[in-house]
Amino acid sequence: MIDTHAHLTHLDYNESELKNVIKRMDNNIIIASGTNDSDNKEVIDLVNNYENIYGVIGIHPTEIDKISSDSYEFIENNLNNPKIIGIGEVGLDYHYECDKEKEKEVFIKQIELANKYHKTLVIHSRDATKDVYDILKKYKDINTKAVIHCYSSSLEMAYEFIKLNCMLGIGGVLTFKNSKVLKDVVLNIDLKYLLLETDSPYLAPEPYRGTKNEPYNIIYVAKKIAEIKNISLDDVLKVTTENACRQFDLDVNL
């Protein structure tokens, strides 16, 4: 299994928790996501210390007030680490009051880095689907791969994002009773465009909704996809693992 999106910093788990969380994913892969300068440094430490952890680093849209002149330099200087396989979590978040133009500026700069270094983009989109799509269409090279993390938009937009060389990150929300739109997306979109993710420690799936999430819970997302598509769990795990390896240029044997 590959959990394509998890947060594993000191703010998310204490030291003993983190060791146990990682151990439960032995023989599986976790892609740890950064959100700001301190997060990104912790992601670098994680990928350098754990064989089964890879990482993406970037500036999250809700963290742009903390950005410094060194932020982009740090990201760029660490993209040569073979275990840093993408730029993320980046994008737009209009859920709260924000400086939309500043968010767009920071997002575009990180898209340009992804284009330059041929790294996969991991994209956060909250109440901002149209602007995310328009910016990707205008600024992202078509050969630059991307993931729409925690996909929550319509089936129609799913097809449009896929045309832009994006895959869809599917997490614990799929198991919630009120996730009708997402279930429709999963039913209708070919499995070859779907990725498994947890967004740990957030959005724990049923039957653990409301508790601290962890990467191993990805199995419940996979089971739900198998149920919706009426296919075997083995097929879901096999294809989504292949998808993750392809979208992140990962060369691993699981």
Image (cartoon, rainbow, N blue to C red):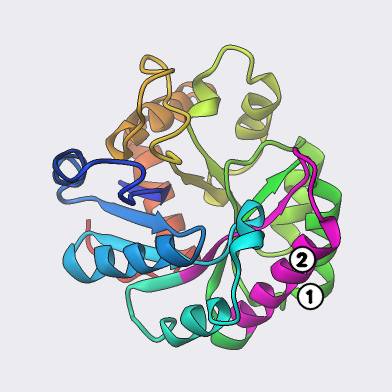
Where are the magenta residues, as a range? Answer: 86-115
Q: Is residue 220 magenta-colored?
A: no
Give me the C-alpha separation between circle 2 and circle 1.
5 Å
Q: Nearer the viewer, residue 71 or 169?
A: 71
What is the secondary structure assignment of the residue under circle 2? helix
Which residue is pictured at 77% across the width and 36% down the height?
Answer: 154
Q: Residue at x 59, y 75 (%)?
A: 68
What percent of the width, then of the height, locates residue 89?
55, 58
Q: How many neighbours does mark 1 have within 10 angstroms: few (below 14), some (14-19), or many (20 or more)?
A: some
Q: Is residue 62 above or below residue 215?
A: below
Give the labeled residue for mark 2: 136
Q: Locate residue 55: give its quadrant.
A: bottom left
> Which label belongs to residue 139?
1
- In the rendered image, residue 200, in percent from the top left (x then y), is placed at 40, 39
Residue 161 lies in what quarter of the image? bottom right
Horizontal relation, residue 15 to residue 88: left or right: left
